[in-house]
Amino acid sequence: MIQTKGLTAVLLRCRSGIYNLLWNIVKEGGHRGLAECQKLFKAEIWNCSLHDQHVFQKLPIFFKRSLPHAAITHELTVQCRQNRIPGCRCGKTREQQKGKSDWQWGGCSDDIKFGEKETKRFIDKLEKGNDARTAFNLHNNHVGRKVVRAKFRKVCRCHGVTGSCNMKTCWKELAPFNVVGQELKRIYHSAVRVTFVNSKLHKRHNDRDRLVTKKEKKLVYLDSSPNYCARNTTAGSPGMRGRTWESDIVSVEKSRSLCNSCNLRNRTVEHQKQVKCKCKFVWCCTVKCDLCTVKYSHTACV
């Protein structure tokens, strides 16, 4: 009996350790998703600011559900393949058809099913109840996972004499996460407004109500956006007045256009900075560079 209790305690500690590891990876994925969101929208009026985390049902806040959710799925899947999660490494591939072929399965494929399963276990289960917000969040979470899977691809490596590629070894691999982010931003622009009727999400199509299904790779929203040009503490919008861009990141023309879109004036200030340039490798073993002066500017909405 004592041995059984001891074994149970060890198993519980082991499970607790794995759970904590997975939860840390989930948090890493969430931060990665928000960082990608800010990168994708750095040259937009809405720049994925974190001031509005409490407002879930506004367009485009839904994007901050689907993108981090996709990032968590991606992060869990990649770390699984990298053998950073105990008991999880390579995914299964479909059995190859018999016959002549210039490639064969090999290497280590990403286990996307593991990433999807654990993301649902950690994130979807936080959604409780049968209301519009829950249905809205679960749908956009699903779309985030679906886009990650859509970018799941076959990657091959050649084998043969002097690179002749007589035979290829192939495996399944997730696309880089920035590719997933770009695709989510693309479908974000065609998001659909929905209503919640009889515990289901519905959309208007050809003047008729249609049920929103999981088959659709469409992001949805419940309410129209607030005016992100103006400061709105209720909506969590910092507004555009005082927003600045550096010309190295966003062009002066684009910055001025954003200010004009919000009926604000703009002010551009020229600056100079010194950067390393004309770098040369010196034997052995240093790199020597000159210092060059480059011009850049800050543009602000005023």
Image: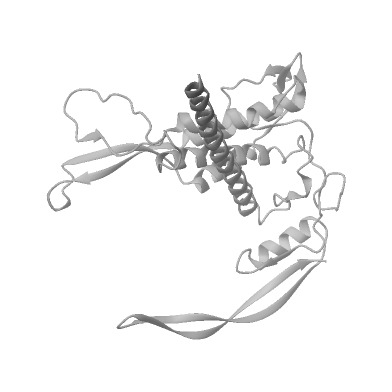
Residue 173 vs residue 191, the one in the foreground: 173
Vertical placement of 69 versus 275: above or below? above
Place of residue 43 in the rendered image (x, y in percent of width and height, measured from the top left): 66, 57
Residue 66 vs residue 228, the one in the foreground: 66
Specify whether 297 is left or right of 292: right
Q: Quadrant of residue 263?
A: bottom right
Specify whether 95 is left or right of 257: left
Q: Which residue is rendered at x = 73% and y = 53% of the image?
A: 45
Residue 268 vs residue 7, the one in the foreground: 7
Q: Quadrant of residue 295?
A: bottom right
Mark yes or no: residue 10 visible: yes
Q: Which residue is rendered at x = 61% and y = 81% of the image?
A: 273
Q: Which residue is rendered at x = 19% and y = 35% of the image?
A: 102
Mark yes or no: residue 218 visible: no
Residue farthest to the left? Answer: 161
Position of the C terminus by quadrant: bottom right
